[in-house]
Image: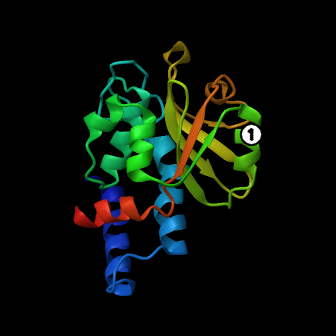
Amino acid sequence: MHLNQQRIYHTIVSYYNFNNNLGLKETPWVKTAYWHQPCKDQIPVYWAGTRWDYNGTTRTPKEGSIACGYFVCTVLKQLGFDIPVVKYSQASSSVMIKALCRNIQRFGSYATFISYMENWPANTAYIVGLDFHTGFLVKTKTATSLLHSYYIYKVGVIKEDIHTADALSSSKSFMVGEISSSQKLLRIFMQH
């Protein structure tokens, strides 16, 4: 693990052990500090410049290339979650979302999707599945961003505003699952 990953891991384990000896609970701390901050700040910088390729499977940012599903799963793995990266990366994003997320919603239009997202609370993170694409959605007090390995022109890993993200506006189907307070992911993390 890298130093930042170790720091995040030890912080959440300490918090869990101190406050949660009776079982897993959803807490505002887990929602904001664990999921939101890495997705908002560290991951985009760490992975920026990593190129997209349909068969990309790199585990090292800025080296090689990475497909969208592998990007989402590799980030989760690097944050300490023991998930089947290959299985989820190669399956439809709905498989991963159903297995890992909560508060799952489906939409058949971009306008409905955007309307729903505008009502999300700040400091939350989600996984989104599109027609043929997947990524993270991160909402702050001022903006909502799509963090993904973008396939158009093989751009690669980028963070862009949801209102200008072509990957979102060109999709006809949307599946969104919350990871900010997912007890499924927290349980996987605690088994690590």
Q: In the image, is residue 25 above or below residue 68?
A: below
Q: In the image, is residue 144 above or below residue 109?
A: below
Residue drawn at x 50%, y 37% as measured from the top left:
135
The quarter of the displayed image where residue 3 is located? bottom left
Q: Position of residue 67 (x, y in %)?
A: 40, 26
The quarter in which the C terminus is drawn is bottom left
Determine crowd level at label 1: few under 14, some 14-19, many 20+ residues with C-alpha closer than 10 A.
few
Q: Which residue is mark 1?
A: 112
The residue at the far top in this view is 153
Q: Position of residue 44 (x, y in %)?
A: 50, 42
Q: In the image, is residue 68 above or below residue 11?
A: above
Q: Position of residue 93 (x, y in %)?
A: 44, 35
Secondary-structure class at tag 1 = helix
Residue drawn at x 75%, y 50% as measured from the top left:
118
Residue drawn at x 39%, y 39% as measured from the top left:
95
Q: In the image, is residue 49 above or below residue 181?
A: above
In terms of depth relative to the viewer, which is nearer, 74 or 181? Answer: 181
Residue drawn at x 70%, y 48% as measured from the top left:
117
Q: Position of residue 102 (x, y in %)?
A: 49, 57
**Amino acid residing under circle 1:** Thr
